[in-house]
Image: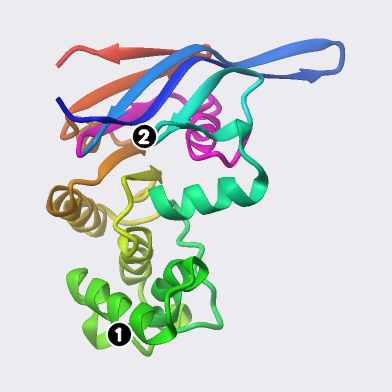
Amino acid sequence: MSAPVITCAHLAKSFRQGDSPVHVLRDVNLTVLAGETIAIVGASGSGKSTLLHILGGLDAPTGGEVLLTGERIDKLSPTAQGNLRNKALGFVYQFHHLLPEFTALENVAMPLAIRGESTANAKARAAEMLNEVGLSHRVTHKPGELSGGERQRVAVARALVTQPACVLADEPTGNLDRNTADHVFDLIMRLNAKYNTALVMVTHDASLAARMQRRYVLADGVLNDVPT
């Protein structure tokens, strides 16, 4: 059996709105194994993005715990959290979040540069990943010179350039037309299989969710699995 990449137990998240508590997540339990694909669906405002941010150590739970590659991330210092995220995770968002002043190559190389790789090695690996996503002819282009689908493919390359244990994807095709969305999703799935990288994807798209190995619905703060 594959080793767990992410494990969360009895996860809870709440905040106060006036005098009333708002419970975003209630007793969420989830284990993500190496190489598997998981879809989380739910209505807007159901807490899907909040859950993804907590799994990635970008937000802290108000109850329960998250282990990332065996380490309880909320107990680490901010520096140690950042190092663990850089080592173990890749992120893809609905909006690409590429830095506009940098080229595609520089954007993809950045996680490796943050890790301390030499500029030459970081750029060489970034060039390989851009070739993987079909953008070897776009390495010197800045985000403003790329189409929406191309920008998202650069974002996928950036997420996978470190060969992370898991990619967390928040509506990665939600800003794309149907045809482009299908191409980007196919790319994510192909690279997931090639690198044995786990994938947890939040999506509104039922047709994409149906292609994942496991599916969950988040409603009223509770995460329920969908039988396959």
Residue for badge 1: 138
Q: Which quarter of the image is occupied by the N terminus? A: top left
Helix, strand or loop status at disc 1? helix
What colour scheme does the image use? rainbow
Is residue 50 found inside the magenta-colored segment of the image? yes
Q: Nearer the viewer, residue 44 or 211?
A: 211
Give the magenta part as a residue range: 35-59
Residue for badge 2: 204
Q: Position of residue 49 (x, y in %)?
A: 51, 35
Which residue appears farthest toward the bottom when viewing the image?
Answer: 140
Q: Nearer the viewer, residue 118 or 169?
A: 118
Quadrant for residue 76, please give it: top right
Tell me whether the residue at label 1 lies in contact with that at label 2, contact meaning CB atoms closer than 8 angstroms. no
Which residue appears at 42% of the width and 53% of the height?
87
Q: Is residue 125 left or right of residue 47?
A: left
Which residue appears at 63% of the width and 31% of the height?
60
User: In this rendering, does residue 90 appear at all?
Assistant: no
Q: Position of residue 182 (x, y in %)?
A: 20, 52
User: Is residue 170 placed above or below 148 in the rendered structure?
Assistant: above
Task: Rate crowding at label 2 as few (under 14), some (14 to 19) or many (20 or more) other CA atoms within 10 Å.
Answer: some
Q: Is residue 166 left or right of residue 18?
A: left
